[in-house]
Image: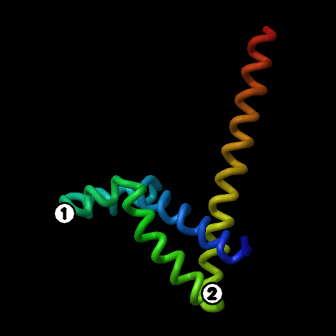
Amino acid sequence: MEVRFLLCLITVEAVTQLICKAEIFDNLRDWLNSRSKFLDSLLSCPYCVSVWAGMLGLIIYFFWEDLRWFAYLMFLHRTSNIFHDLISTLTNFKINLILKRK
């Protein structure tokens, strides 16, 4: 699998998660949801949002030279989240081990 395709795939996943679940967009989502039942249904469904995010991924794939910066940004965003989750899990595991010893 080529790197460009993989980066576009990660971009689609990251955009989907940002739109559906990121706290920073809570107020915008609430405002959009209050305006339209369709938008409420769309924005609460990661599967639905991923279809539209997939179109963004396709555009990035075909216009790579102009839009690769966005794919790199989303890649850094997702990998930093993965490392954060991993470190948090390991830290919690270590704390639980220490507490069990006492």
Number of residues whose C-alpha sits closer than 10 Å to that of mark 1, classed few (under 14), some (14–19) or many (20 or more): few
Which quadrant of the figure contains the N terminus?
Answer: bottom right
Q: Is residue 60 found left or right of 49 in the rendered image?
A: right
Residue hosting label 2: 64
The image quadrant that residue 93 belongs to is top right
Dot 2, crowdedness within 10 Å: few (<14), some or many (≥20)?
some
Residue that lies at the very extreme toward the front in this rendered image = 1
| Residue at 81%, 10% in the rendered image | 101
Image x and y of residue 95, in percent:
75, 24
Residue 78 percent across, percent down from the top left: 63, 59
Task: Identify which residue is drawn at 27% across, 56% down.
Answer: 41
- Seen at 26% across and 57% down, the residue is 40
Q: Which one is earlier in the sequence, the residue at label 1 or at label 2?
A: 1
Residue position marked by numbered label 1 in the rendering: 36
- Badge 1 marks a residue whose secondary structure is loop
Type of amino acid at the residue the image marks with label 1: Ser
Which amino acid, mark 2? Trp
The reply, left or right, for residue 46 in relation to residue 102 is left
